[in-house]
Amino acid sequence: MAYKHVNKKGVTYYLHGKTRKTSTGKTATLYFFSKEVGAGALDAVPAGYVVSETANGMLVLKKK
């Protein structure tokens, strides 16, 4: 079951993650919210992060 969050406007978003290799050879995980469940959907918020909402209702992950 993918992690879902409803913003203040009542729209449901699902958390996704995508791992990429940087130009220096390190791996970095990009987190994003989508209105539909797709490949890379996560079951929970990663450790050390919290879900925050901007003034216009956009969801973002912030480090604690």
Image (spheres, rainbow, N blue to C red):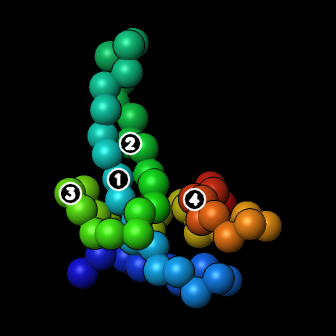
- Label 3, label 1: how far apart the Cα atoms are: 9 Å
Q: Residue at x 62, y 55 (%)?
A: 63
Callout 3: SS: loop
Please name the residue that numbered disc 3 is placed on. Answer: 39
Please name the residue that numbered disc 1 is placed on. Answer: 17
| Marks 1,2: beta carbons within 8 A | yes
**Which comes sooner in the sequence, label 3 or label 4?**
3
Residue 50 sits in which quadrant?
Answer: bottom right
**Which comes sooner in the sequence, label 2 or label 3?**
2
Q: How dense is the environment of label 2, judged by Cα within 10 Å: few (below 14), some, or many (20 and up)?
A: few
The amino acid sitting under disc 2 is Thr
Callout in the foreground (3, 4): 3
Please name the residue that numbered disc 2 is placed on. Answer: 29
Callout 2: SS: strand
Q: Residue at x 45, y 54 (%)?
A: 32
Q: Any mark on residue 3, and which?
A: none
Callout 4: SS: strand
Pick out the residue farthest to the left: 39
